[in-house]
Image (cartoon, grey):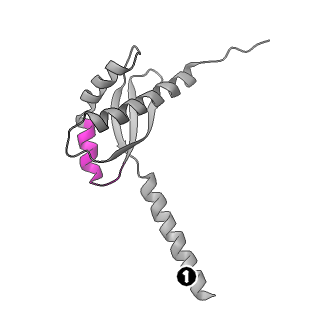
Amino acid sequence: MVRKKSKTPNRAFKVADQIQRDLTELIARELKDPRVGMVTIQGVEVTPDYAHAKVFFSLLTGDSKLCTEGLNQAAGFLRAGLFKRLHIHTVPTLHFVYDQTTERAADMNALIARAVASRAKED
């Protein structure tokens, strides 16, 4: 007997991926807020009903709090831009969250490098 596969999770991933690509382009080309610097969209999580989307971003230079404020204030503008590009019934409300993964990775690499250097001095 053939099992019926649910297409909902796969569709949610596709929608999140498309939102990520479109937001990257919208922020780079159309957003003129000086608080928003060199932003990289790391990922998007969409709720099952497509009402809300958490957008995780990292920042190359600048203040993360100011950038988060700027992006959250521009969320309506960005949502309107997504509405023109996406062909889905409900375009989610955007919530921007600063992703500290790259900073944590750099800190861990520095700690490992210090541990290796101290071990090399002991030998």
Q: Position of residue 52 (x, y in %)?
A: 38, 27
Is 116 situated above or below 39?
below
Q: Is residue 47 visible?
A: no
Is 106 situated above or below 24?
below
Q: Position of residue 51 (x, y in %)?
A: 39, 22
Left or right of 2 on screen, residue 88: left
Q: Identify the residue at the far right of this view.
A: 1
Query: Which quadrant would the C terminus be assigned to in this image?
Result: bottom right
Q: Quadrant location of residue 6? A: top right
In front here: 121 or 28? 28
Magenta region, main secondary structure: helix
Mark 1, residue position:
118
Q: Which residues are magenta?
A: 59-72
Left or right of 45 on screen, residue 60: left
Query: Which quadrant would the N terminus be assigned to in this image?
Result: top right
The residue under the point 25% across, 28% down is 76
Q: Is residue 25 visible?
A: yes
Is 20 situated above or below 110?
above
Helix, strand or loop under label 1: helix
The residue under the point 33% across, 20% down is 83
Q: Is residue 67 magenta?
A: yes
Disc 1 marks a residue whose amino acid type is: Ser
* Disc 1 packing (10 Å; few <14; some 14–19; many ≥20): few
